[in-house]
Amino acid sequence: MGVNCELVWRESSNYVDGEVSPDLRKAIEEHAQACNRCAAVLSGLKNIVQLYGDERMSDVPLGYGQRLHRRLEEDMNPSRRGFMGWMVALAASILVGGSFELARSASEGVPQRLSRHSQVAFHAIPPDLRVLVSLGGKIFHVPTCRTINNRATAVAMTAQQAIQDGYTPCPRCLHKYLRTG
Amino acid sequence: MSTALQHDLAEPSHEEALLKRVKAGERELFYELVQPYERRVYAAALSILRNEAEAEDAAQEAVLKAFKHIGQFRAEAKFSTWLLQIVINEARMRRRKQLAHAMEPIADQPNDDGEYIPRDFADWREIPSETLERREIRDALMKALATLGEKYREVFVLRDMQRLSIEETAKILDISTASVKTRLLRARLMLRDLLSPGFGGGWTTKLSFAKGNKPWE
């Protein structure tokens, strides 16, 4: 069975999907051995399928899942929307104002390693810093932190989102942002 | 992330049980039903809208619509197919509004399913997947994808990035399986042509599509 270039191009997609008959597959491969252009098309297509099929190519924005979940919750429980909005506004005021008292009240739950006399300046953390939060945890970490408990359940979000959601910074991996007052 | 991989496939029996409970009134379980597909929902919206914020908003809206109309879902269809049909419709509707607002011609999809002649580039060596660790490579791949016509992007994203079957892709987009295959072939060949200068030249020169050139024109 002989094939020409046009037929190889037309069947190239089916070929890389393994959806051509054994006879056609053989004929395409024989043709490609003698035809550099068709060989380049077939290897290029294989690379395309492999590269775009990689999980890293289908990333979603940080915090997407949480925002979707929250929106759904708000839709199911409209009465809570006001409360949520109030919480977000409160968190924003902490970030923007950097108020000493508000920052201290928001830092409840910071582990014992932080000095009792320390005051945490949350606003020093870049708001778009990518951080991880474990399921059931209260602390957020940078992804390379070695003290993340239950790492398998960790979800990614921005530092701003984590603070808004009531999480506090890890005193180990984020110590450089935690100034004493 | 490993959790995302785990969520990629829902256990059919678990999903069926969840569906029954949600329909019976346990509405708070709906998110659990949707979660395995939330990445696909976003990817489908992004394939049409090409803007992250717009895609996320469309994805949220589509999930809310699915929640409101869950009573209309019939068990003979797959839940994921039904959900993706809703998001595709939502994204298409937004895209039409954008085009109308921008006074752009709607016919940005010429009927060009005919022969496509791939360009004569040198053979690629096998590209190791570690290449994707580089942000600029991932960005270049996404930019190339964004230059394809909508009907090619939709098929390519569902089939090659979300790894749906030809049949499911056809059902979600409401087109024939033959059209899926034709568009997929065209999308793959165009992407190969767009990316060949980069992968062939080690990304040392500016990519041709970055200048707005389309080699098939």
Image (tube, coloured by chain):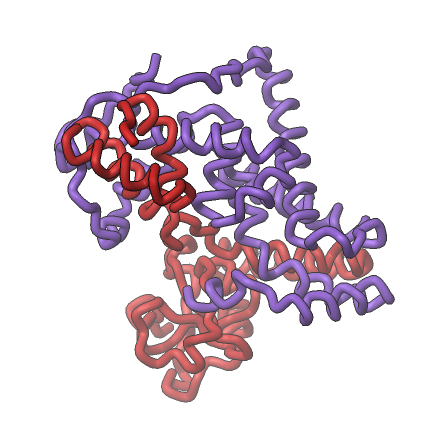
Chain colours: A red, B purple
Residue A89 at least partly seen:
no
Image quadrant holding the C terminus of chain B, namely top left
Residue sitting at x 57%, y 11%: B105
Residue sitting at x 56%, y 12%: B104
Q: Is residue B98 above or below residue B90?
A: above
- Corner quadrant of residue B48: top right
Residue A9 at least partly seen:
yes
Q: Residue furthest bottom?
A: A112
- Corner quadrant of residue A111: bottom left
| Percent x, y of residue B17 | 75, 70
Residue sitting at x 68%, y 62%: B33
Between B65 and B196, the one lying in front of the other is: B196
Q: Residue furthest front?
A: A1
Is A90 positioned to the left or the right of A148 in the image?
right
Is A2 positioned to the left or the right of A171 in the image?
left
Residue sitting at x 50%, y 64%: A162
| Percent x, y of residue B91 | 62, 34
| Percent x, y of residue A142 | 35, 67
| Percent x, y of residue A51 | 32, 46
- Corner quadrant of residue A156: bottom left
Between A106 and B100, the one lying in front of the other is: B100
